[in-house]
Amino acid sequence: MSVSEERSDGMMGGAAGRLAIYPGTFDPVHHGHVDIARRAARLFDQVVVAVYDRPSKSLLFSPEERISLFRASLDAVGAHDVVVEGYSGLTVNYAHRRGAIAIVRGLRAVFDFEYEYQMTTMNRHLQAGVETVFLTTSLEFAYLSSTIVKEVAFGGAELDGLVPSVVADALTSRLVSHPR
């Protein structure tokens, strides 16, 4: 079966088995993101962390830097089985092109669910063969968001426990060279 062939059950399936996409901007990647990627890797044959290149929000790191930081973060915890790559365009179309059967999304709280539910129903309308799987954030990371991490970093607070060390170093370096 080719990467884009439909299986007899109507789901898409790639040559590598059941592929899931974990999309996001990851600016910056934090421990919660790494946790979701690792947990998704236990559920699917292959997981691709898909780093969106041009979101409609202001970013601190370039797409290449965000990809590199996520790869280094996964390597640091021994999660060598998760692929990290960039993409552009609609997430659901990217997932379909890659032959993914699912899009993985992390949920921290009820307000996340409302937004994600809207996205899921639209994605189902656009590509019925790509499901969305929600993983609730581990309690130890439930308070993390990239926005909060950046605010903490801009405020000069310690980043231990929030982001992998490679990300903390990159944030510190970026803030020294590009203060607000």
Image (cartoon, helix red, strand yellow):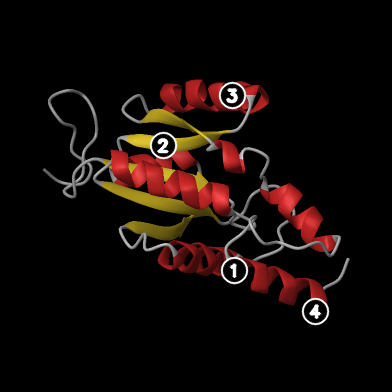
Q: CA distance from mark 3 to mark 4?
A: 37 Å
Type of amino acid at the residue the image marks with label 4: Ser
Element on which disc 2 rests: strand
Q: Earlier in the sequence, mark 2 or mark 3?
A: 2
Type of amino acid at the residue the image marks with label 2: Ile
Q: CA distance from mark 4 to mark 2?
A: 36 Å
**50 and 137: which one is in front?**
137
Give the residue at x 16% y 48%: 15
Q: CA distance from mark 1 to mark 3?
A: 30 Å
Marker disc for residue 103 = 2
Percent of width and height locating residue 52: 54, 52
Q: CA distance from mark 1 to mark 4?
A: 18 Å
Which quarter of the picture shows residue 96? top left
Type of amino acid at the residue the image marks with label 1: Ser
Give the residue at x 56% y 27%: 116
**167 and 67: which one is in front?**
167
Residue tagged 4: 177
Which quarter of the picture shows residue 140? top right
Element on which disc 3 rests: helix
2 vs 3, front mark: 3
Residue tagged 1: 165
Type of amino acid at the residue the image marks with label 3: Phe
Number of marks present in the image shown: 4
Q: Residues within 10 Å of mark 2 (few under 14, many from 20)?
A: many
Q: Earlier in the sequence, mark 1 or mark 2?
A: 2
Q: Are marks 1 and 3 in contact (CB under 8 Å)?
A: no
